Image (tube, grey):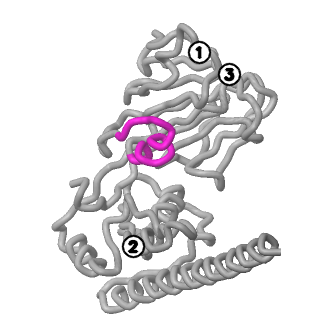
Amino acid sequence: MDVSTGIGYENCNLRISVKTSVRHKIRFLESRNKVHHDAINFCQAILREKSFEWKALMRNNLSQPINDVDLVVTVGGDGTLLQASHFMDDKIPVLGVNSDPTKINEVEQFSNEFDATRSTGQLCAATVENFEQVLDSILEGQIVPSNLTRIMISVNAQQLSTYALNDILAAHPCPASLSRFSLRIRKNDHDQPCSPLVNCRSSGLRVSTAAGSTAAMHSAGGFPMPILSQDLQYMVREPISPGAVSDFMHGCIKRDQTMYTSWSSRKGIVYVDGSHINHTIQDGDIIEISSKAPTLKVFLPYQFL
């Protein structure tokens, strides 16, 4: 009887604990939503005070190239800036405003209940705290944008319209399935190979820019690169028995080189900067990956300057 009663109390305490945790998470999500919308309203209020024309546009309404403007301001996080970059050439600069930066004390407070990290703003030079100051510095020419390398992708000699600012992933659409492909790196100005033909059986191929090298690439064991580097970093994910070519499972594609990947699986997808933009590939397709894409002008946080 005592044992049964004890189990009953434990279950009761567990239910109370779960309910409390759920309440905390709901409040946290509500807070995130409010902080983000407050940041948008704040930035718009600042812009209304300036003597230039501007237009607000929701990120999901972006469908055409961005033209005829002098500056793009994104309010959100790195994901918002990435999405805007897919519609931008190398002429218009972008300023990212992190609308909801992570609070370290909050992460520690709820570490036993849920992940309380907020918006990632690695590429965002401003928050609501300093938005007007940064904007004025841009307008007065006191700070200038940096040119970030992007990835150009071609499939069977047909260039994809979207350039990757962070990274690309070529993999089977089912994450549990094997991907078969071969890769070789060549110089751009002649046909001489810079690497042997590397035959791979793995969970896919990831290629990142310098800006993206601190994201998924770093989490997978890659190395952070200087953000203005024009090289790309590649990694064959979870290779099976690489053997003699193990040294070529992870490396760099120099600015004057192109990686040629021959896809040998029945199905495949090239994901560009996450899952939203993707291109289907199949057995026999040739994927060309290089840093030939137009750069993106980005106002970077002070720690990169």
Of residue 24 and residue 246, the one placed in the foreground of this image is: 24
The residue labelled by disc 2 is: 103
Q: Does the magenta stretch include residue 146?
A: no
Please give left or right for residue 296 compared with residue 175 in the image.
Answer: left
Q: Distance between the residues labelled 2 and 1?
A: 42 Å
Which label's residue is closer to the chain start, 3 or 1?
A: 3
Looking at the picture, does residue 209 appear above or below residue 301? above
Q: Examine the rendering and report whether any part of residue 299 can be seen.
A: yes
The residue labelled by disc 1 is: 242
Kindly indicate whether the residue at mark 2 contacts the one at mark 3 (C-beta within 8 angstroms): no
Which label's residue is closer to the chain start, 3 or 2?
A: 2
Q: Which residue is drawn at 18% across and 73% down?
A: 140
Which label's residue is closer to the chain start, 2 or 1?
A: 2
Q: Which residue is drawn at 24% across and 70% down?
A: 138
Q: Quadrant of the N terminus?
A: bottom right
Camera-nearest label, 2 or 1: 2
Q: What residue type is labelled 1?
A: Pro
Q: Distance between the residues labelled 3 and 2?
A: 41 Å
In which quarter of the view is residue 154 placed? top right
Q: What residue type is labelled 3?
A: Arg
The residue labelled by disc 3 is: 201
Q: Which amino acid does label 2 sit on?
A: Lys
Label 1 environment density (alpha carbons within 10 Å; few <14, some 14–19, many ≥20): some
Q: Residue at x 55, y 50 (%)?
A: 273
Q: How far apart are marks 3 and 1 (CA)?
A: 8 Å
Kindly indicate whether the residue at mark 1 contacts the one at mark 3 (C-beta within 8 angstroms): no
Please give left or right for residue 267 compared with residue 90 in the image.
Answer: right
Label 2 environment density (alpha carbons within 10 Å; few <14, some 14–19, many ≥20): few
Query: Which segment did they paint magenta?
Result: 211-224
Q: Which residue is drawn at 34% across and 88% down?
A: 46
